[in-house]
Amino acid sequence: MISLPRIASEADAEHDSDTASAVVAQPKCYGITMFTLQYNEVRDFYVNLLNARVVQEKFGHFCNMDIAGIPVSLRPAENCEMVSYFHLNLVLKRQDSLLAELRRQGIIVTTVGPFTNFRDPEGRVVKLSEEQLSMK
């Protein structure tokens, strides 16, 4: 088992001002970079189907998007970068029209428990629920 060092909290830093290496315990994510081999297809999937808002773009080089409040930068995989994989969990109250369009385009849609699942053109899983579920 690998043991990682404990990250100091702000309270620890206040009580131990001699600890110059104290790190804030609550990091904040300012964005995700998604590397792809299918730039056009993946970009169109997120922009046209999931209504991602394009913030900045140099087509074919990068597309900075906002997906449900999450800053995502889409970039072509080059220089030995690997395609990025993750599960994207979204809340969408009225899913019917999106699910109908996904099915019309031949995208497989499944339901497992409270989630409706489908994949983007490179296989990243998108999970929809009608309410935000606990990450426990």
Image (cartoon, rainbow, N blue to C red):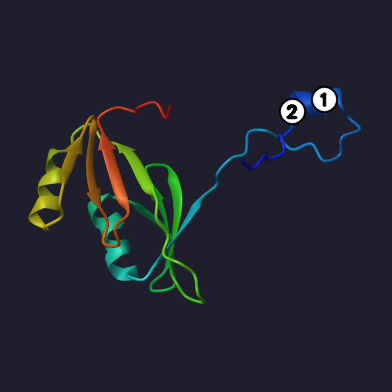
Residue 13, image x, y percentages: 81, 29
Residue 73 left/right relative to 39: right
Q: Quadrant of the N terminus?
A: top right
Residue at image location 30% in from the left, 49% down from the top: 125
What is the three-letter code of the residue carrying label 1? Answer: Glu
Left or right of 80 on screen, residue 16: right
Q: Residue furthest right?
A: 18
Picture coordinates of residue 53 (x, y %)?
Answer: 36, 52
Q: Residue at x 72, y 38 (%)?
A: 5
**Which residue corresponds to mark 1?**
14
The disc label shown at residue 42, or none: none
Q: What residue is rendered at 44% in x and 73% in y? A: 61
Secondary structure of residue under mark 1: helix
Separation of marks 2 and 1 at Cα, in angstroms: 6 Å
Mark carried by residue 10 = 2
Please report contact status of discs 2 and 1: CB closer than 8 Å, yes or no.
yes
Q: For the residue carrying disc 1, how many other residues have a C-alpha within 10 Å: few (<14), some (14-19), or many (20+)? A: few
Which quadrant of the figure has residue 70?
Answer: top left
- Quadrant into which the C terminus falls: top left
The tally of labels here is 2
Residue 18, quarter of picture? top right
Figure quadrant of residue 43: bottom left
Helix or strand or loop: what does disc 2 sit on?
helix
Task: Establish if 51 lies above or below 135.
Answer: below
Give left or right: position of 135 versus 97.
right
Indicate whether 95 appears above or below 75. Answer: above
Picture layout, residue 10 above or below residue 52? above
